[in-house]
Image (tube, rainbow, N blue to C red):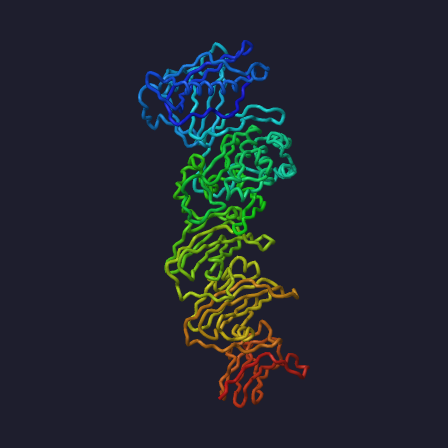
């Protein structure tokens, strides 16, 4: 027995509805051995009037017969194809009132059909008409069931002649019935029937929250798809959906490959219709229109995907609901009709979710321009991740246990797909709206691998402190104005050769008060402080692991263990120091002790300073490259440290000044000198007079010099006893008396 069905539009009925029970039998021609028995509980809309004794209004009965005839013509393929008369004789029609008052069904008498509709179920062991059902299944019947996401279900049985079905199947309608696609399968040779889509069941459910194991809902080896993906991009067919599917399936064998090749073709050939999004009258969403125009909104993407899968023999559903996509604002409350459409496919015994609209590209918010940018994330996405930006009308299609409420969906932080593609795991807080406390708020992200981050608060990254961690980052924000403002967090892989950061998180920050005491120097770069990134550049084991260093007396030090062949250039910057860059650099003293380096910092005044480190390989003749910076704060207004002594080229990195550290010496005083220098034969201090320093047993050059009668003082070294000249290594300034 061959069979198929299509939906060519059922008769519509006028305004009022009268519950009727309808049964009919259809007999084909003599050569046809098929008998159709259809006994549905059908709510028929009819203009009336009706009474309990006279339900057979002429218009109503005509519509019923028209409906039955329409379906009968489509349920017997053997007659249809033999060129016979395609009219159908109704040999038996029975119409009667549904008996009794509508019954209140208990929860056990209702069962979801997977589309958000509760279906009345028969009592145990009974069919839908209330008759006792046989325990022995009927082996010769053929059944086809169709579902749509809007809730329409059609179930029909076809039986050989002179047989009686054991169960009456039903035909149920909901207002706004929809044209259904053909459910035809294909094995790349001929079209065959596709099993009816089944509603989600327990085996389809995934645990929520995400278990961090995989981004996909089933194992997928993308490398195995490389040839198939390349083939899909080359196929160019737009005459008919059937021809397109036939062309695509030439390279696909398994159901997964069929879904993949259809997905890739749509994502790379259908662009988003921005004009249609803003103007409903310009939208064309039927599969053939989408194919021929090469553009549509989400409804068209999903419809085309569903029909192509149906032709290919894949069970597929078109789902609808709310989404956090184009046109969404952070913290938005969802009301009214659904705003997005996507699909679910049945593979390897389970349902899986995908969104070809979002897989195809992006729309720029400012220019409303669509750009093809393939996104693998939305192919068979793990449901616990898919729910971040897709909320289906029917909670069963979350494929989660437990399911999320709409309120939870609305209040969850906006995760972009790059959040997971970059290996990020969790974020705190996970709410879309952040409330500041005392003018500040903190956000943290955990990830598997080393990742670089930056941020934008109200369009700038100047009002926060972002510090990198080995497995994530920490961000402290200090909004400089009250009210709601957008916070975006960006990230990139540390191994990426491109200096491109992708947005991974979006928040709305609600600030009720501003902390006026927090102002960051304009030269402060993000991230702040040492991290795994500075370690990669050779700065190991920092003595100051925190990004912010507070000092009360204006002095602080920073010690690192250096990697091999590293040369470091430090700078000290401030917004209001009034000093030149060279003069500010003199407030940093660099001391090398083996593979360790110490940086002594004496602040010229109170305030906020940025200590930046640049580095390069000693063997590299090129420029220094910025590595990281610290924020140094001092609130003591009495602080006023002079600069360190000026050094000359002959002052080696491993030389050290023990005293005097200050580059400004008092006038008319005896000053004690203690310097650590090696490979030197003689050291002189030149002031009004010249003073010779002596080498002590512990390796220090020591001596005393009087500053009377001079404004500058120099330390000179005689490197070789065979030479007669001295080299300047240090310069001090003497105060004016």
* 665 or 374, nearer to the observer: 374
* 342 or 349, nearer to the observer: 342
Identified at 57% across, 54% down, the residue is 500
Image location of residue 324, percent across then percent down:
47, 45
Image location of residue 85, percent across then percent down:
56, 14
Above/below status of 490 relative to 735 = above
Is residue 41 at all visible to an observer of this figure?
Answer: yes
Identified at 53% across, 17% down, the residue is 76
Above/below status of 663 relative to 32 = below
* 113 or 304, nearer to the observer: 304
* 69 or 557, nearer to the observer: 69
Above/below status of 107 relative to 29 = below
Q: Quadrant of the N terminus?
A: top right
Above/below status of 271 relative to 48 = below
Is residue 430 at all visible to an observer of this figure?
Answer: no
686 sits left or right of 157 in the view: right
Identified at 41% across, 32% down, the residue is 116
How many discs appear? Answer: 0
Image location of residue 123, percent across then percent down:
36, 21
57 sits left or right of 717 in the view: left
Image location of residue 107, percent across then percent down:
34, 28
Q: Quadrant of residue 646?
A: bottom right
């Amino acid at each position: 027995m061959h069979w198929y069905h299509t939906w060519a539009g059922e008769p519509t009925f006028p305004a009022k509805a009268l519950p009727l029970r309808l049964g009919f039998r259809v007999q084909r021609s003599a050569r046809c051995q098929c008998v159709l028995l259809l006994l549905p509980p059908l709510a028929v809309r009819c203009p009336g009037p009706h009474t309990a004794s006279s339900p057979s209004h002429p218009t109503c009965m005509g519509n019923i017969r028209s409906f039955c005839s329409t379906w009968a013509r489509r349920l017997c393929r053997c007659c249809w194809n033999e060129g016979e008369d395609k009219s159908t004789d109704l040999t038996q029609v029975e119409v009667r009132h549904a008996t009794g008052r509508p019954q209140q069904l208990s929860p056990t008498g209702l069962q979801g059909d997977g589309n958000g509709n509760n279906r009345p179920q028969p009592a145990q062991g009974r069919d839908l008409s209330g008759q006792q059902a046989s325990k022995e299944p009927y082996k010769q019947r053929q059944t086809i069931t169709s579902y749509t996401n809007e809730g329409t279900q059609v179930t029909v049985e076809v039986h050989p002649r002179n047989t009686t079905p054991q169960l009456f199947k039903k035909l149920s309608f909901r207002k706004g019935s929809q044209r259904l696609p053909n459910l035809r399968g294909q094995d790349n040779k001929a079209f065959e029937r596709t099993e009816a889509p089944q509603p989600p069941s327990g085996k389809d459910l995934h645990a929520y929250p995400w278990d961090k194991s995989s981004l996909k809902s089933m194992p997928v080896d993308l490398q195995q798809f490389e040839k198939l993906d390349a083939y899909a991009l080359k196929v160019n067919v737009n005459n008919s959906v059937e021809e397109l599917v036939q062309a695509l399936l030439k390279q696909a064998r398994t159901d997964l490959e069929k879904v993949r090749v259809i997905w890739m073709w749509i994502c790379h050939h259908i662009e988003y219709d921005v004009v249609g999004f803003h103007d409903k009258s310009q939208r064309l969403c039927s599969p053939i229109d989408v194919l021929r125009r090469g553009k549509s909104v989400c409804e068209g993407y999903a419809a085309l995907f569903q029909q192509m899968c149906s032709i290919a023999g894949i069970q597929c559903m078109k789902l609808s609901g709310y989404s956090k996509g184009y046109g969404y604002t952070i913290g938005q409350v969802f009301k009214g009709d659904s705003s997005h459409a996507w699909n679910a496919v049945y593979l390897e015994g389970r349902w899986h979710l995908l969104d070809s609209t979002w897989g195809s590209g992006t729309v720029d918010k400012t220019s409303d321009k669509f750009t093809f940018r393939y996104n693998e994330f939305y192919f068979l996405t793990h449901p616990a991740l898919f729910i971040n930006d897709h909320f289906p009308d029917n909670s069963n299609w979350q494929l989660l246990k437990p399911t999320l409420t709409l309120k939870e969906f609305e209040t969850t932080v906006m995760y972009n797909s790059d959040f997971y593609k970059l290996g990020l795991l969790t974020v705190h807080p996970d709410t879309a709206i952040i409330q500041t406390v005392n003018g500040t708020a903190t956000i943290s992200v955990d990830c598997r691998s080393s990742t670089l981050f930056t941020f934008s608060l109200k369009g700038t990254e100047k009002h926060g402190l972002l510090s990198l961690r080995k497995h994530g980052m920490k961000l402290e924000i200090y909004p400089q104005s009250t009210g709601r403002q957008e916070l975006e967090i960006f990230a990139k892989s540390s191994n990426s050769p491109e200096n491109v950061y992708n947005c991974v998180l979006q928040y709305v920050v609600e600030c009720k008060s501003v902390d006026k005491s927090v102002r960051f120097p304009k030269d402060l770069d993000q991230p702040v402080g040492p991290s795994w990134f500075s370690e990669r550049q050779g700065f190991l084991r920092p003595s100051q692991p925190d990004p912010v260093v507070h000092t009360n007396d204006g002095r602080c030090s920073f010690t690192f263990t250096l990697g091999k062949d590293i040369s470091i250039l430090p700078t000290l910057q401030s917004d209001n120091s009034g000093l030149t860059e060279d003069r500010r650099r003199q407030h940093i003293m660099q001391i090398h002790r083996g593979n360790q380096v110490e940086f002594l910092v004496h602040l010229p005044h109170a305030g906020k300073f940025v200590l930046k480190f640049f580095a390069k390989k000693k063997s590299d003749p090129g420029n220094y490259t910025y590595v990281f910076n610290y924020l140094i704060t001092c609130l003591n207004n009495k602080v006023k440290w002079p600069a360190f002594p000026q050094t000359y080229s002959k002052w080696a990195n491993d030389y050290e000044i023990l005293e005097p550290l200050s580059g400004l010496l008092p006038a008319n005083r005896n000053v004690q000198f203690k310097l650590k220098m090696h490979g030197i034969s003689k050291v002189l201090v030149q002031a009004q007079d010249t003073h010779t320093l002596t080498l002590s047993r512990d390796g220090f050059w020591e001596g005393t010099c009087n500053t009377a009668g001079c404004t500058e003082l120099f330390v000179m070294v005689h490197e070789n006893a065979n030479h007669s000249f001295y080299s300047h290594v240090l310069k001090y300034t003497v105060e004016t008396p």
